Image: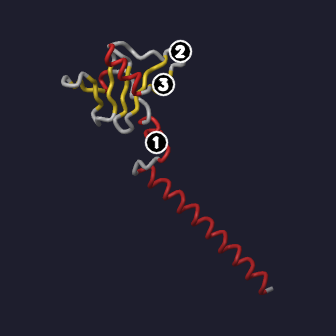
Amino acid sequence: SAPRRDRSESRSRSRERRKQERRDRRAEKKQRAEHGVDQGKEEREYKRSLFPPGADLSSYTFDDKLFWYVTGDKVWWFRPDLCLWYDSRTGSYYSFDDVTKDYVSVTPEMAVQALADGQGVVV
């Protein structure tokens, strides 16, 4: 009879331990939600930052010395007349392909030529 009681107590302790672990996980999840820690959100924002923010000029401020529109964080530079974006973090140029409806990488030579000619990049 004694071993049976021990087994029952052991099961009871295991059950209580699992319940406590679930409570702890729920509390941690709730705390993360309250503090706005959302790894998925951070990852989406990071991926979004890898590509130009678009052609909406309200996202930019015009730099009248350089003749580029620049985002507030000075990362993205945009020439709407040439449909040309510049990523200052990587030194990469992009244009928008109307056929694929996506951003395409542009070589620095093509970008310099477009700036010199005053004509958009042909992709």
Residue at x-position 53% and y-position 15%: 99
Which quadrant of the rendered structure holds the N terminus? bottom right
Tag count? 3
* Crowd band around label 3 with a 10 angstrom C-alpha radius: few (<14), some (14–19), many (20+): some
- Mark closest to the chain's N terminus, 3 or 1: 1
Is 52 situated above or below 39? above
Relative side of 68 to 112, left or right? left
Q: Nearer the viewer, mark 3 or mark 1?
A: 3
- Secondary structure at badge 3 equals strand
Give the residue number, with chain letter if any, for mark 3. Answer: 104
Give the residue number, with chain letter if any, for mark 2. Answer: 99
- Mark closest to the chain's N terminus, 3 or 2: 2
Amino acid on which disc 1 is placed: Lys
* Residue 26 percent across, percent down from the top left: 53, 57
Amino acid on which disc 2 is placed: Val
Whole-Å distance between the Cαs marked 3 and 1?
A: 25 Å
* Residue 71 percent across, percent down from the top left: 30, 31
Q: Which mark is residue 29?
A: none
Amino acid on which disc 3 is placed: Val
Give the residue number, with chain letter if any, for mark 1. Answer: 41
* Residue 100 percent across, percent down from the top left: 54, 19
- Secondary structure at badge 1 equals helix
Give the image quarter of residue 69: top left
- Secondary structure at badge 2 equals loop
Residue at x-position 47% and y-position 53%: 30
Give the image quarter of residue 23: bottom right
Residue 23 or residue 50, whichever sits in front: 50
Query: As drawn, which residue projects farthest toward the bottom?
Result: 2
